[in-house]
Amino acid sequence: MTAIGAQAQRLLSPKRPHRSFFESFIRTLIIVCTALAVVLSSVSICDGHWLLVEDRLFGLWYFCTVSNHSEPDCMRDLSQAHVPGLAVGMGLARSVAALAVVAAIFGLELLMVSQVCEDVRSRRKWAIGSYLLLVAFILSSGGLVTFMILLKSQVTLMGFTLMFWCEFTASFLFFLNATSGLHINSLTQPWDQLRKV
């Protein structure tokens, strides 16, 4: 095909419709909130101290005893806390929570790629990214629930630390961004359908 023919074909082919400002703004907001949730969850899991009960600090990685005038005495051996099944249960809780972050990172990557490289598969990438955020929400919630079930006799609302609330917020943001991403994807018309019209 000659250069003139290629240009004529390009001019005759339908133009890709531009997204509205509102849709672009919502998609950008979903990506930014997902990135914030990934950071919150990562920091919460790395620190891992989620519950303070009197002079004891329970976490995903350590069990610590705290006194008024000294540094916390932390042990990696969670059986020292004398809570049945704590060592095995915390291993499960931190594994599930860490997998949630991994799923969220892959979901975030697909959301960003779908916006940067717009093509016929952009909607599918966005949908897969949103489903991965839903998986991250399920895993993150599983980690939180496991933690609370293991320490149900110790749990008080005021005993939860800032790191626990960071993980709780991240879990909520995973859910909110996943459902918002799927909803906005269902409201917009696919590019391949527009091409057939």
Image (cartoon, rainbow, N blue to C red):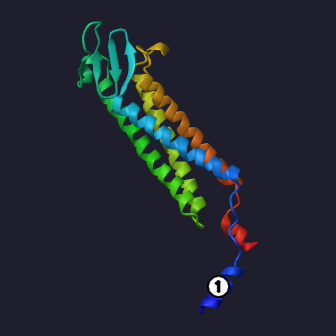
In which quadrant of the rendered view does residue 85 lie? top left
Residue sitting at x 70%, y 65%: 17
Q: Is residue 163 left or right of residue 2?
A: left
Residue 160 location, x and y as percent?
44, 19
Visible residue check, residue 134: no
Visible residue check, residue 147: yes
| Neighbour tally class for label 1: few under 14, some 14-19, many 20 plus, Cα within 10 Å | few
Task: Give the residue at mark 1.
Answer: 7
Residue sitting at x 42%, y 42%: 101
Residue sitting at x 60%, y 93%: 2
The image shows residue 34, relative to residue 55, as above or below, that is below
Residue 126 location, x and y as percent?
57, 55
Q: Nearer the viewer, residue 125 or 86?
A: 125
Residue sitting at x 53%, y 40%: 174
Q: Residue furthest bottom?
A: 2
Residue 194 location, x and y as percent?
72, 68
The image shows residue 38, relative to residue 112, as above or below, that is above
Q: Identify the amino acid type marked 1.
A: Gln
Q: Is residue 73 left or right of residue 25?
A: left
